[in-house]
Image (cartoon, rainbow, N blue to C red):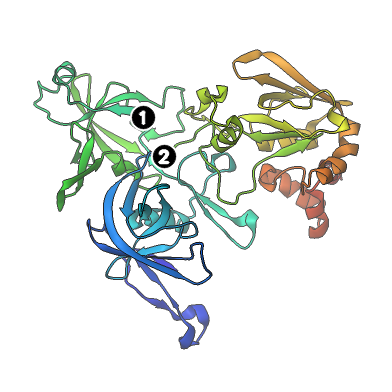
Amino acid sequence: MMEGAGSNTATDPASNGNNNNNVTKLLTLSTGLPKLDENVTCVGFPQGGTQISVTRGVVSRIDVDSQYVLRIQIDAAINPGNSGGPVFDEQGQVVGIASSHLRGAGNIGYIIPSKIVSNFLQMCKDNNEVKVEDRFSGLGALVVQEESIEDSKHVPGIPNLAILGSQTLESKALRHNLGLDELDILGGVRIVGSLNNNNNDSFHTGDRLDGDDVLLSINGIPIGMDGTIQLSETRPDERINFRSLVTCQRVGSKVTLDVLRKKERKELSVSLNMSRFLVPQYDDFDAIPLYVVVGGCVFTPLSLPLVSEKKSNKSTSFSRYYRDQRSGNEQMIVLSKVLNDEVNVGYHGWKNLVLKSVNGFEPKNIQELVDVIVRKMEGEMMNFRCTVVGEQDADYVICMSEQEVIHSENRVLQRHMIASWCSMEAISKELRDEVEKNEPSETKRRNAYHTMKDMRHVLERV
């Protein structure tokens, strides 16, 4: 068990009644960053054995990853199975959580600093959660498992400044052109563009950075012309990318930005939020994917891991959507594959098509797709209209008899060893509440979720 940053090491005698011989010790999170060459101990259960493993080393480097999130490099061995285990300093405090290692290199491991871990724990304690369409659409979201999978919490991920990038200002001509010389300003970085160009008012609240702004400081901490800041006041010779000041904050935090805009000095107050990419950046570990299977056609929200699995290192037309931000709860639903069956003859081999409509309805996300299929379908046919990326005006139609789809459902699921026609998280809370209202028996209710036919039958009850 862990306590938040700054707490003292303690025990929890209440966790095991009055049995003082079997108490649970609480781990203490360090409030600061370890120093270079400081001794650390990594504890976990890596591959190669069944007992606990302890490895020792030193702090080699403190920098940021490709998403500008603070990380600590250590030379203590971190192997598959170590992930999630604590890393202790010489005082026995947790300085971080084992995260990954660099393949092909010797003893280069990375840990997540305790200050970032503390942010996630505090957000979990405050019951900060994200909606289903926001899960894994940002960076670093944490899943807190409960006894029931349905009750698991999805805590917000890593916040950012909602910018497309930044440009260093070592060029004297560029600094003069931006007006920095006139004000005798030595540092700062130029903002190359903003993610707020799509009228997305839900991304950040308060002021925003614009393209061509010069960001001079964050919360009073000056930014050098090379885009770095001091690691801390007591460690001025160690410098790190300026965006680490933002990514180490919790979602909802406010930061003060000193900005030069059109040669005028401004102070902006920004409330940080996580990215809401239209195409999720990663999947949860051991997660059940969001999917719907209808007549052997598998529909799922597009995600970067899905693209990476399908493209086999080849270029993909979906790349144009990777940095797009959502303005609401929309997802890009794609036909991932067609499971060959008699019901879908004529569409075998179809894949990677974007779903536009189902019998005239245009579902914005996977939950709306399930809702349309079980509650709003009329007529004898099921028509799925899809398009190819870059050919939005070209419709490809999957037309199947509704009765044939229903009759083939169990056959398709059993043949391909699929437990349910859709994932539980693809069913909205409102739809689950309605099923629960119409079917009081928990056993029958759980069985009803396994097929589209049974769900429809429950929902049609008066």
Q: Residue shown at 18%/35% (left/top)?
A: 224
Nearest the viewer among 132 and 460 is 132
| 302 sits to left or right of 13 | right
**In the image, what residue type sits under mark 2?**
Asn
The residue at the point 55 percent across, 26 percent down is: 314
> Which is more toward the observer, 400 or 55?
55
Residue that appears at 30% across and 43% down: 244
Q: Is residue 25 above or below residue 457?
A: below
Tag 1 residue: 163
User: Mark 1 is on which residue type?
Assistant: Ile
Image height of 310 relative to 140, above or below: above
Q: Which numbered tag is attached to residue 273?
A: 2
Per the image, label 1 sits on a secondary structure element best described as strand
Residue 455 placement (x, y as % from top left): 81, 44
User: Can you give x and y, in whole percent of width and height, for residue 329 in the image?
Assistant: 57, 34
Q: Would residue 30 be visible to someone looking at this image?
A: no
On the rendered image, what quadrant is the C terminus found in?
A: top right
CA gap between label 2 and label 1 equals: 12 Å
**Quarter holding residue 272:** top left
Find residue 406 and report its image quarter: top right
Which sits earlier in the primary sequence, circle 2 or circle 1? 1
Q: Is residue 107 in sight in this rendering?
A: yes
| Crowd band around label 2 with a 10 angstrom C-alpha radius: few (<14), some (14–19), many (20+) | many
